[in-house]
Structures are given as structure tokens and as C-alpha cells.
């Protein structure tokens, strides 16, 4: 039976996973298309480097703030409608960017896109916590992580094909149309899938736990190490999204590659990154601690960032290998810290709240550091300074993870009792 449903217990569980996967996967199509056109914006002098970075940071910051809000309301509102409206508004924002070459309007629409997309992830975590048992939740979390590299791949592929035949603004029209179609698939596909009465009953049952409010949630996060873990979470978000975003620009500026060729090279990264979550799953089975597993991957990433700093500009192949290793490690960390860690709070009824909060700090922090990245690239040291920043924060993540490991171990033991 399990083989017929790709490891899920029944058809309903598999369809639940599949629709959640498709919904979240489409958000990457509607966000990384901006990364794909960044070399065009730069080479065509549409915007300066600092303005290109500020547009990107507006998305990250609004996405992060929205994650915090959606995480809290996601434990209380209709998750199905939240996901639909998030996808639909994101699609509309992408569509309007076709008509928006002016910087202020571009900035506003991309920021709104970030807020809209923030309505998707935390509600999906809540759906998993209510519809699956503990082993299935872990499988769901690992499988959901593949949305990131595959979504990245499709976003770059659609952008590449569009740029071959049409100007850069058509990229947003293409990706927005795709996301809009997925929004409709979600709306009609989930219509009779989730049992709202059961969900309401579960919500009512958990209400006394949540009534303790922010103070109790903060205590729970502090005792488990999740509060301190926010710093490594910001760092993995930066190394995952910022590195991925600046890759096409790096190849174009360092090796003189055309935008389409840079995108073709960049598309190799998500193909490699699909394996990151499964490497993390394998290692975590050995270590039995998501933070220890994350520490290992942060350490590996730091080594490859050093290689990128000292030898990357000499070889396009070495640069690609180093960046692939870094992003692969960060996808592994991402599934541990952003997906599995929040699901460990299922007993407290705070999966959406904590999941939204952790994802919020990841993107708000990434937005701030991405602004710094833009300023560093316009400074005299350029890419060298940016690489040193990435190396420094990777080492910081290793040190903080060391502190969090014993706290998380005690928390997991308490949850098992």
C-alpha cells in the first residue's frame, strides 16, 4: 500500500502532500525570476547595484514580516484560503511588473509580492501538523524541501526560455501566469481534501495551550534553544537565498558571461541541491539532533566559501562547484531548522506560530544582509568583501550551533515523554 502512495499511508495523505508541494514550489517560480533578470537590469543600467539589492531586500523583509504575521494567524484562520490568496496576489504582482520599469513602483510591487508569498509556508506547516502523524510529518518535511531546488530550476528555466525570445519584463508575465494557474489548482484541488470540522476541533483543543500567548512561546523557544537558533537561521537564509540570487550576476561580471549563459550555469545548482535534504535526513538519522546535523553542513559550507574566495575567480568550473556545495549545504540546514524544528512543537499547538517566526527572522535577516551585499559590491573590494562576509557568518553559525545542541537534545527528550 505504501509503495502505491509514494511512502504515504493512503491516497488522501499523498494528495495532501502533493498539493502542498505544488503550491509552495510555485512560490519559488514567482520570486527567483527576479534573480534571473538581475544581470539584465545591471548590464542594461536599468537600476544601480544598490537599487537592485534594495528591491531584493524589500522582498525578503516583507516576506519575513509577513511570515511572522501569517505564522500567528495561521494557527487560527482557514489555512486553505490563506494559501490561495497568497499565491493569487503573488501572481498578480508578477504580472504587473511587466508594466513597471520605474524603480518606486517596481520596489512596491516586489515588496507586496514578498508579503503575499509569506501567507503560504506557515499554513502548510499547520496542515501537516493536523493531517499527519509524527513519522509522516518528518517524511512530509523532507519531501517538501525538494520544492526549493526544483522551484529554483523551473524559475530559471522559464526565465531563460523567455529571455532568449523576449525582453526581460516578459519574465515576470510568464512566471506570474504559472503561479496563477497553480493558485487555481490549489483552490479546486483542496476543496474537499481537508476536513474543516476536524481541524476546528483540533484548533479548539489546542486553544488553552495557545492562550498562554507570547510569553509562554518565548519561554518554550528559549529552553529548547530555538530562540538562540534564530541567528544560524538568519545565516542559512542568507547563504541559501543571497548566494543563489547573486550567482548569475557573479558569472556575468567575473567571467563576462551573457545572461542566458549565466542562467544556464546557475540551473546546475538546483539539480545538485535536490540531494541536500536527503543528505541531511541520512545524517540526522545517525546523529539524532537537527542542530548537530546543521552544524556539520555549516562547517562544510565555510570550507567551500574559503575555496570560492581564494580560487573561485580563476575558474568558472571551480566557482560553480563551490557555490553548488554551499547552497547544497544550506538546503540541508534549511530542512532541519525551518521545517523539522517547527514540527517538533506539534504537542504545544504552536507549529504555525514558531514556523512562521523562524522563517520570518531568516528572511528579515537575509534582507538586511542583502542590502549590505549590494553596498559591498559597489565598494572597492567588491566580490572579495562579499565573500569574506559570507565566510564570517558561516563560522558564526557553527559557534552558535555548538551552544544550542545540548539544549535541543534535552527538549527532544522531554517531547518524547
Image: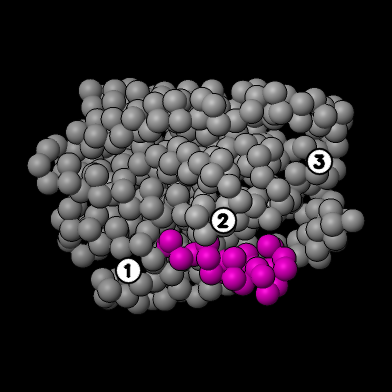
| In this picture, residue 59 sits left or right of residue 267 | right
Q: Check the image and report above or below for 43 versus 76.
A: below
Dot 2: few (<14), some (14–19), or many (≥20) neighbours within 10 Å? few
Q: Which residue is mark 2?
A: 1
Considering depth in this image, is 160 or 5 the residue closer to the camera? 5
Left or right relative to 236: residue 109: left
* Residue 283, image x, y percentages: 61, 72
Is 60 drawn above or below residue 376 in the view shown?
above
Element carrying mark 1: helix
For disc 3, the marked residue is 348
Q: Is residue 9 magenta?
A: no
108 or 90: nearer the viewer? 90
Secondary-structure class at tag 2: loop
Residue in the image at 35% along x and 41% along y: 29
| Region of the chain picked out in magenta, as a range | 273-297
Are the two marked residues, 2 and 3, in contact with CB atoms closer than 8 angstroms?
no
Which quarter of the rendered picture does the C terminus lie within? bottom right
Which of discs 3 and 1 lies nearer the camera? The answer is 3
Q: Give the quadrant of residue 119.
A: top right
Residue with the mark numbered 1: 320
Q: Nearer the viewer, residue 404 or 287?
A: 287
Q: Is residue 286 left or right of residue 311?
A: right
- Looking at the image, tell me whether mark 2 or mark 3 is earlier in sequence order: 2
Query: Which residue is painted at 61% across and 23% down in the image?
Result: 78
Q: Using the numbered discs, state the Cα–Cα distance from disc 3 to disc 1 in whole angstroms.
A: 43 Å
282 is within the stretch colored magenta: yes
Amino acid at each position: 500500500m505504501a509503495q502505491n502512495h509514494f511512502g504515504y499511508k493512503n491516497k488522501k495523505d499523498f494528495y495532501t502532500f502533493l498539493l502542498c508541494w505544488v503550491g509552495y514550489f510555485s512560490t519559488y517560480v514567482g520570486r527567483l525570476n527576479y534573480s534571473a533578470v538581475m544581470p539584465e537590469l545591471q548590464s542594461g543600467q536599468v537600476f544601480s547595484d544598490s537599487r537592485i539589492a534594495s528591491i531584493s531586500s524589500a522582498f525578503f523583509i516583507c516576506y519575513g514580516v509577513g511570515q511572522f504575521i501569517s505564522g500567528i494567524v495561521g494557527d487560527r484562520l482557514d489555512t486553505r484560503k490563506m494559501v490561495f490568496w497568497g499565491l493569487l496576489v503573488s501572481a498578480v504582482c508578477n504580472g504587473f511588473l511587466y508594466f513597471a520599469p520605474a524603480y518606486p513602483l517596481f520596489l512596491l510591487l516586489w515588496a507586496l509580492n514578498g508579503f503575499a508569498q509569506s501567507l503560504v509556508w506557515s499554513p502548510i506547516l499547520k496542515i501537516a501538523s493536523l493531517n499527519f502523524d509524527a513519522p509522516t510529518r518528518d517524511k512530509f518535511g523532507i519531501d517538501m524541501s525538494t520544492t526549493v531546488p526544483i522551484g529554483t530550476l523551473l524559475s530559471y528555466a522559464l526565465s531563460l526560455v523567455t529571455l532568449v525570445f523576449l525582453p526581460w519584463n516578459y519574465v515576470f508575465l510568464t512566471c506570474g501566469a504559472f503561479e496563477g494557474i497553480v493558485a487555481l489548482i490549489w483552490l479546486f484541488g483542496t476543496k474537499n481534501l481537508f476536513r474543516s470540522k476536524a481541524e476546528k476541533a483540533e484548533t479548539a483543543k489546542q486553544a488553552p495551550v495557545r492562550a498562554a500567548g507570547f510569553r509562554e512561546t518565548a519561554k518554550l523557544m528559549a529552553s529548547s534553544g530555538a530562540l538562540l537558533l534564530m541567528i544560524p537561521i538568519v545565516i542559512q537564509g542568507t547563504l541559501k537565498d543571497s548566494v543563489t540570487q547573486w550567482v548569475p550576476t557573479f558569472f556575468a561580471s567575473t567571467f563576462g558571461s551573457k545572461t542566458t549563459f549565466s542562467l544556464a550555469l546557475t540551473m546546475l545548482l538546483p539539480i545538485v541541491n535536490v540531494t541536500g535534504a536527503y543528505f541531511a535526513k541520512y545524517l540526522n538519522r545517525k546523529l539524532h539532533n537537527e542542530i548537530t546535523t546543521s552544524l556539520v553542513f555549516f562547517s562544510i559550507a565555510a570550507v567551500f566559501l574559503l575555496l570560492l574566495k581564494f580560487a573561485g575567480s580563476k575558474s568558472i568550473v571551480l566557482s560553480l562547484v563551490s557555490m553548488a556545495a554551499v547552497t547544497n549545504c544550506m538546503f540541508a540546514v534549511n530542512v532541519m531548522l525551518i521545517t523539522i524544528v517547527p514540527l517538533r512543537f506539534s504537542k504545544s499547538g504552536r507549529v504555525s506560530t514558531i514556523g512562521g517566526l523562524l522563517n520570518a527572522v531568516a528572511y528579515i535577516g537575509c534582507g538586511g544582509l542583502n542590502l549590505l551585499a549590494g553596498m559591498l559590491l559597489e565598494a572597492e573590494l567588491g566580490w572579495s568583501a562579499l565573500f569574506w562576509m559570507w565566510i564570517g557568518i558561516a563560522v558564526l553559525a557553527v559557534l552558535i550551533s555548538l551552544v544550542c545542541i545540548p539544549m535541543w537534545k534535552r527538549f527532544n527528550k522531554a517531547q518524547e515523554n
